[in-house]
Amino acid sequence: MRHLMSPMDFSVEELDKLLSLANDIEHHPEKYAHACDGKKLATCFYEPSTRTRLSFEAAMLNLGGSILGFSSADSSSAAKGESVSDTIRVISCYADICAMRHPKEGAPLVASQKSTIPVINAGDGGHQHPTQTLTDLLTIHSLKGHLGDLTIGLCGDLKFGRTVHSLIHALIRYPNIRFVLISPEELRVPSYIREEVLTQHNIPYQEVERLEDAMADLDILYMTRVQKERFFNEEDYVRMKDFYILDKAKMALAKEDMLVLHPLPRVNEISVEVDDDPRAAYFKQAQYGVYVRMALILTLLEVEVC
Ligand code: NCD
C-alpha cells in the first residue's frame, strides 16, 4: 500500500506515467466513468479548502465512486480531542482511500503510519502540498509541452507557502531548471530549502525583491497569496499582504508565451484585469487538478483501465 506525503514519493518515471494517465483522462473521460464503482474516498479536512477538497470529491465522483468526510476540525471529533491516529483507524473502516489536510506539519504522515488505506497529504501546515504540485506539473506539461528547460519565478509568500515548497522539490529533478525567488526579505524561501534542496543539487537560483526585475526572464510566473493564517500577528500580515500586485503594466514586461500560474485562492496579488490575458492559466490549472487527482486515486488504488 502506498501513501502520498511529498512529490518525492514518486520517481520521475512514475510521475511521467501519472501525468500521461491524467492526460488520457482529460481526453477520454468516458473510459474511466466506472473505474472506481463501489469505492469510497474520505476527505478529512481540518483546514479550509475549496479547490483541493472539491476537486478530490469531483475526481472520485467522475470515477464512479462515492465520497464521505468532514470539512473542518470543528465538525469532527478533533473538537473533542481525538488524535489523527485514532481518527484514521476509524476512517480506514469506512473508506478505501483518504485525502487529509491539517494545519500541523506532519499530521498526514502520522495518520499514514496507523492507516490501513492509502493516505494523501492534501496540505500540511506550511510544509508540503503534493497534489497541488501534481496539478502544477500537469498544467506546465500540458501548456508548455515539457517540464525541463524552464526559468520559473516563484513570487509572494515563499516562507509559508507549502505549494512553493513542494513545487521546488518536484522541479529540481528535471533538466535545466532555474528559479527566480521573488519575495520580501521576511517571506524568503526557508533556509533548509535553499541549502539542502537548491544549493546541494546545484540548481541555479536568484533571489529578488522586485517583480519588475524578474518578469522579462520568466517562462512561468507562479504567484502565491500571503498566508494570513500562518502569521503570528495581524500587523505583519497587513504590512505584507499587498507587497505584490500583478497587473497589466507588469504583464507587458513579460515574454509573450510566459504562463501565469497560481494555486488559488487569489486575494489581491493578481489584478482581475490580468484574467483575460491569454497567458493567465490559473483557472485552467484548477481544472487540471481534477484530472490529476483522478489519476492519483487510480494509481494509489491500483485500478487499471484498459
Ligand atoms: C493552496 C493551499 O492550500 O496551500 N491552495 C490550494 O490548495 N489550491 C494555496 C493557498 O491557500 O494559498
Image: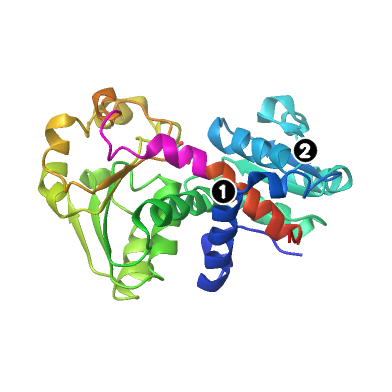
Seen at 20% across and 53% down, the residue is 218
Q: Which residue is rendered at x = 39% and y = 53% of the image? A: 140
Question: Which residue lies at the image location 34% right of the left edge and 73% below the top edge?
Answer: 175
Indicate the quadrant where residue 176 lies. Answer: bottom left
Q: Quadrant of residue 50?
A: top right
User: Residue 287 at what x, y percent from top left?
Assistant: 50, 38
Residue 74 seen anywhere in this rendered image of the structure: yes
Between 57 and 77, the one nearer to me in the picture: 57
Q: Say which amino acid is labelled 2.
A: Glu
- The magenta region covers 276-288
Q: Any magenta on residue 259?
A: no
Q: Secondary structure at mark 2?
A: loop
Q: Are marks 2 and 1 in contact (CB under 8 Å)?
A: no
Q: Residues within 10 Å of mark 1 (few under 14, many from 20)?
A: few
Q: How is the image coloured?
A: rainbow
Number of numbered labels in the structure image: 2
- The residue drawn where x is 70% and y is 49% is 31
Q: Amino acid at mark 1?
A: His
Judged from the image, the secondary structure of the residue bearing numbered disc 1 is: helix
Counting from the top left corner in percent of width and height, residue 27 is at: 56, 48
**Rendered-image quadrant of the C terminus:** bottom right
Query: Local crowd at mark 2 within 10 Å, few (<14), some, or many (≥20)?
Result: few
Q: Position of residue 91 (x, y in %)?
A: 82, 43
In magenta segment, residue 283: yes
The quarter of the image holding the N terminus is bottom right
Q: Which residue is mark 1?
A: 27
User: Disc 2 and disc 1: Cα gap in Å?
Assistant: 43 Å
Q: Residue 82 shows which numbered tag?
A: 2
